[in-house]
Amino acid sequence: MSQAVRTTCAYCGVGCGVVATPNGERSVAIAGDPDHPANGGRLCSKGTHLGETVGLEGRLLLPMIGDKRASWDKALDLVARRFRETIARHGPDSVAFYVSGQLLTEDYYVANKLMKGFIGSANIDTNSRLCMSSAVAGHVRAFGEDVVPASYDDLDAADLFVLVGSNTAWCHPIVYQRIQARRAASGAKLVVIDPRRTETCEDADLHLAIRPGTDVALMNGLLAYCCREGLVDEAYLAASVSVPEGFWESLDEGHDLWTIAKVCDVPPADLQRFYDLFAAHPRTVTLFSQGINQSLRGTDQVNAICNVHLATGRIGKPGAAPFSITGQPNAMGGREVGGLASSLAAHMDFAPDNIARVGRFWSAPRMATKAGLKAVDLFRGVSEGRIKAIWIMATNPAVSMPDAGRVREALAGCPFVVVSDVIADTDTTRYAHVRLPAAGWGEKDGTVTNSERRISRQRPLFSLPGEARPDWWIVKEVGRRMGWGHAFAYDRPADVWREHARLSAYQNDGARLFDLKTHAAIGNEAYDALEPFSWGGRPFADSRFPTPDGRARLVAVRQAPLADPLSAWPMTLNTGRYRDQWHTMTRTGLSPKLARHREEPLVEVHPRDAERLGLAEGDIARVTTPQGDSLFRVSLSAGQRRGELFTPIHWTDRQSTGGRTGLLPRPLVDPHSGQPGFKQTPARAEKVAVEWRGFLLLHGHAELVPDCLWATRVTVPTGTLYELAGAGDPARLDRWLPKGERVEVSDARRGSRRTAIIADGRLAAGLFIARDDSLPPRDWLIAQLGKAANAAVLAGRPAGQQVDRGPIICVCFDVGLRTIVSAIAEQALVDVPAIGKALGAGTNCGSCRPALARILAEHPPGQKEGIA
Ligand SMILES: Nc1nc2c(c(=O)[nH]1)N[C@H]1C(S)=C(S)[C@@H](COP(=O)(O)OP(=O)(O)OC[C@H]3O[C@@H](n4cnc5c(=O)[nH]c(N)nc54)[C@H](O)[C@@H]3O)O[C@H]1N2
Ligand SMILES: Nc1nc2c(c(=O)[nH]1)N[C@H]1C(S)=C(S)[C@@H](COP(=O)(O)OP(=O)(O)OC[C@H]3O[C@@H](n4cnc5c(=O)[nH]c(N)nc54)[C@H](O)[C@@H]3O)O[C@H]1N2
Ligand code: SF4
Ligand SMILES: [Mo]
């Protein structure tokens, strides 16, 4: 057993501390770090199962030029030469970097410095543009600087939580658990504002299922109410906030309860209840995420929230703040180094004295003089041939950009594409001329900043596999080879950290809250031992803001008119996340446990819409938008608003023939932030004719996806499962079966066929096809993979036993829906803790607790068992 290492989770912006104990070659035991202030020892399902994702399956381990392996020298020389040549012929703006909130701060800093100080362009943008750039733009408008004025301590002090456009229970589970703990301890209230009824709403005091895109009306309505009821803090406004002329008058008309209820399409009584809760609880934290940011009016929506907090003085005090919760582990670190095309560095913009100051600090030969292209424009630049060389790091834009089909075409036509990734074959690396193998989580060494401005170390657990190298090293080597060796002479992440910290303090004198001077001179050992710390203290506690006059600003924002659905596009497509998958699944996709929560990409539809569209549970539907189309498995959900569809962002060409959500959103953006409006795309859905369904099970890890109408790969213990559906003769699937003894039964009348391949007496594969609903459950067969077997496996179950546990709800203890429902009935379990006592479910990471609460509500004890 090796030493335990304290590090930070690979996934979301909650930034939980992890204690990782390597216990063999690429194997590690994971626990929450009880001493980390972000999580106090807790981890969600994704963090808990990090150990299942550190294997080397699919890793990119060598630099590759085209399909040939290359030495690092050759690959780096080529990248440096092609970028140099392109700049020499077409100028600095003909090249671009597209980077990521999954880089460490040190990686990010070096990439930003190379582009903005040495290449002389600001064409470096990041996937954070798709994620929280509206929050950045809103903060700058309201406070003068991109400062998140909240911390997790505020969650422990709040009396009212308002979650707007955030599925916190799934996407920031430990924040959600902290909210729940506060509610249990103090009776604090929870209001959720989301067009969908998500699991976050399960236990809420109030859920407002507003019409999508009406958040400005809702918040302005609340502000008008505050005005009427005397909740506006006049003294605070007078001392600390600038109010534009006509601001209050603009709220006089059209902001009464009835009008707002109508615009937002919520019951007036519910709206009144929201107002009452707001009035009764001055300690309010409003947490917001992608339902607010990913909108064509994202920045205005952020300011509508900030306006309410500023006007009521609910900011800079314990338990009172607007709180933008960030998505990626280092979204905030990226903002701090200035990794967005619209900022320069260290919370400085492109004002002339900032350019001069940063130029002096870097001794930069060629400073960028203006903002660069934002993500959507940047890929448009590639598509129009203005950008002729692009370097993509730690992001998968062929999947995650809006209108991803056009992004793929742009990359296919780009003269020079470099991709640094940990995975060899992603939908983006397929377009790369050069692939550079980056160090991944568990190997990387540096810092990340979480949602509450807390900086923590990520520390290595394993030595670098193959020839993988950290991103900061790769970028500095290219900088050196482009001729700037002196400026990129870093030997270790701590060298980069010190420079970054010094820049934040350089000629700052309190002008910017972001200032790391206390950590600028630390030695290598102190850096290695760095404990989590946050910068900025309690921002705005002194009621002063980083604007020229020291005052915050109310920003007049109006609800944009709502377009009626067009006849060709009668539905609206909303997109987002699943509890147990992370983005394009390059890592969570390796975990059999995490795969169990949602095995396939679903399109969620309200049952009444489904009826109208002729869709039934389990059907395959084609979702079409003006941008493209893709197939999804239909899931009926009464939690959907009528007229809306919801699809997940996770599935790629690597896992499935369908589920390609990225092809569907339009490349339209918020005018202030450039953030795409991912949450509302005109769409339609229709049933796709399927003649048969089936599944293919293979022993061992498999990479390819069978080419039939519907094929989705699911990682299972010791093998791979493909869920299948199609039309025509399924016989061509036979070529996916390995060699071995073939046993088969078929029923010509029902059109079903069951085939198993037995190699050396063990089950190597199974292919089950049916034209009715006679497919056996998968669990037992999965457990037989690689085990001694004979033709009896074709039954799909052991003789005489019922083994179907139903869909897995608790991935930690592998507890299925049917097991839970029977236990509730048989043991008269009355609440979630009782289920935990009986079955273990929900007692480890806790991510499934909202689901358990829902199951209890749907199948209360005393009711006769029965699941549709
Ligand atoms: N499990 C998991 N967790 C993650 C991630 C992951 O991939 N998987 N990714 C991380 C990242 S990078 C991010 S950015 C965060 C995102 O975290 P969230 O923002 O919580 O996640 P989303 O599912 O994108 O969207 C949130 C909600 O916005 C709602 N919404 C849509 N339109 C509107 C609207 O007009 N108004 C309002 N009020 N709400 C609306 C949607 O219905 C959805 O439930 O999650 C982070 N955490
Ligand atoms: N329709 C729709 N689209 C969306 C969203 C939505 O809600 N709806 N959400 C948007 C948001 S908020 C986000 S954040 C994006 C996320 O979208 P992406 O950033 O494209 O998704 P990831 O799968 O996280 O991509 C990370 C890539 O980096 C690789 N990687 C991991 N660690 C490292 C490392 O240390 N170094 C290097 N070089 N590579 C590494 C991974 O293998 C993977 O290929 O998607 C956006 N797209
Ligand atoms: S909430 Fe979950 S995914 Fe996010 S940092 Fe914590 S353990 Fe990781
Ligand atoms: Mo994100």
Image (cartoon, rainbow, N blue to C red):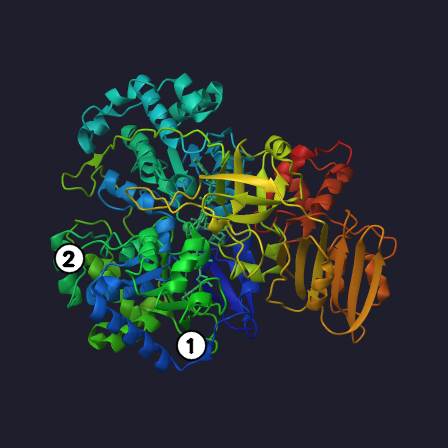
Q: What kind of residue is marked 2?
A: Ile
Q: Which residue is rendered at x = 26% and y = 61% of the image?
A: 519
Pick the residue in front: 772 or 779.
772
Q: Which residue is rendered at x = 33% and y = 59% of the image?
A: 382
Pick the residue in front: 742 or 17.
742
Q: What kind of residue is marked 1?
A: Pro
Which of the 4 quarters of the picture holds residue 858? top right
- Quadrant in which the C terminus is drawn: top right
Which of the 4 quarters of the picture holds residue 833? top right
Residue farthest right in this picture: 800
Q: Which residue is rendered at x = 53% and y = 61% of the image?
A: 50
Residue 305 at least partly seen: yes
Q: What is the secondary structure assignment of the residue under circle 2?
A: helix
Q: Is residue 622 left or right of residue 787?
A: left
Residue 63: mark:
1
Query: Residue 124 location in percent, x, y?
Result: 29, 59
Dot in front, 1 or 2 = 1
Query: Residue 238 location in percent, x, y?
Result: 18, 27
Eyeballing the image, is 387 above or below 477? Answer: above
Q: Earlier in the sequence, mark 1 or mark 2?
A: 1
Residue 525 at least partly seen: no
Pick the residue in front: 810 or 129.
129
Task: Look at mark 2 in the image and give the residue it sits on.
Answer: 355
Q: Is residue 110 left or right of residue 612?
A: left
Task: Decide: few, some or many residues near mark 2? Use Cα within 10 Å; few <14, some 14-19, many ≥20.
Answer: many
Q: Is residue 196 left or right of residue 675?
A: right
Query: Residue 847 location in percent, x, y?
Result: 56, 47
